[in-house]
Image: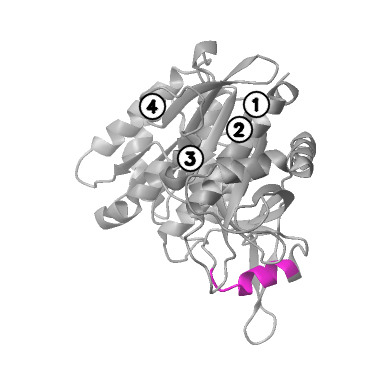
Amino acid sequence: MKILIVDDEPQRYGRLVETLKSVGVDQSDIDTAVSTRQADELLQHTDFDLLILDIVLPLWPQGSGDPQNALDLLFAIHQEDGLKRPRHIVGLTADRGAAERAEADFTALTWTIIEYSPTNDDWVNRLVACVRYLQGVAGPAPVAPTDRAEVVVVCALAAPELANVLKLPWGWRSQPTMLPDATFVHRGQFMAATGKTYTVAAAHAPRMGMVSSALLSASLIEHLRPRVIVMTGICAGLRNKVGLGNVLLADPSWDFQSGKRIKQGPDGDFAARAHQLPAPTMVRRLLQEIDRQRTDLEQMAKAYDGDRPQGDARVIAGPVACGSAVLADGEVIEEIKKRQHGEVIGVEMENYGVYAAAAGAAEPQPMAFALKGVCDFADPDKVDDAQDFAAYMSANVLQLLLERHGAVLMP
């Protein structure tokens, strides 16, 4: 049993360490870090069964604490190939106000938050109970075949993204089911052109952004063991490269905000470290053929029950950048084109998290890709009128791809 405690006040864990000895955990098996950078170094080389993570942490030793540092470490654990993932993560805080402010994010990223107290041992008892549980569990429980889903659809929003997926004629059950980590999924099935039936599950993240989508995807992969995981929804496109309602295959996807701020000139500069993840070549080829024929896409657009933007119905594969903030000034996209990828066709907030979760999953890893409809151009003229149509096209292109070529993607 290996435990990592990340807290800038490690001395407060004396009672916990002594109690853990009584359940067979040697003190030599407990490592500590006082900053997220120290934790990052330890997680590069050691497999930990339990990570106890203070909510308010400094980035460097002797630095000032910030809840964002702990959130960044959690995302790095799920995203970066170089970090070993602990089997269990628990958030800890002595600051009730910080816990309330961070609760929404931490409950999406960890199993629980425990409030530290210097006057009682309730927090110690809860952590010891967690250790006892881990001691009795050799690894993740096997997933029964009846609980699996061959296709998993991930959405960032309940509406209009998941809502349009659930409008597909895929025999969705009337009520969602709950996974062990309290993730609610909608289950259905569809028939491919060959006559074979495939199971499908769909869920939406608790909030927008890479962190939530990465962790939701990791949970769905662990519990449902899909062969394909795909994200649908809406994104921003580059004006004059794509049109409203066009569906973009993110190939590749990367975090355009990944890098470091460096001293260069009076205002400094940003050195990007883009880690690009591609979509499967087979998916790209099949979608390019769908786009070449075009007739089905035009019929799909005409069948939309509402106002639709003018322009051709298209499926376009190309680089789609991913970031943690909504863009509306157009300047950042120009920077991405100039510094990171001159052929970028779109920008959104979640795809890379889904790609990273699949890339970091245990074998057999699912095929991962993202299909998002263009709803605006991320510039000062940004409006929300096309969101529902973009989400509709995204979901229906997925339906066309899976029903026509499901046997090719999942032989």
Q: Which residue is mark 4?
A: 176
Magenta span contains residue 320: no
Q: Is residue 265 above or below residue 69?
A: below
Q: Label 3 amino acid?
A: Asn
Mark closer to the chain start, 4 or 3: 3
Query: Element type at marker 1?
Result: helix
Q: Label 1 amino acid?
A: Glu
Q: Indicate left or right for 176 with 239 as reference.
A: left
Mark 1 vs mark 4, CA separation in Å:
23 Å
Q: Between residues 132 and 299, which one lies in front from this camera angle?
A: 299
Query: Element type at marker 4?
Result: loop
Q: Which residue is mark 1?
A: 403
Q: Which residue is mark 3?
A: 164
Prevailing secondary structure class for the magenta stretch in the rendered image: helix
State the image quarter where residue 101 is shown.
Answer: bottom left
Does residue 83 appear in the picture of this structure? no
Q: How many marks?
A: 4
Q: Is residue 108 above or below residue 384?
A: above
Q: Label 2 amino acid?
A: Gln
Q: Label 4 amino acid?
A: Pro
Q: Residues within 10 Å of mark 1 (few under 14, many from 20)?
A: some
Instruction: State the residue at coordinates (30%, 36%).
Output: 124
Screen quadrant of the C terminus: top right
Q: Between residues 27 and 197, which one lies in front from this camera angle?
A: 197
x%, y% of residue 161?
48, 44
Magenta stretch bounds: 328-337
Mark closer to the chain start, 1 or 4: 4
Q: Are marks 2 and 1 in contact (CB under 8 Å)?
A: yes
Q: Residues within 10 Å of mark 2 (few under 14, many from 20)?
A: some
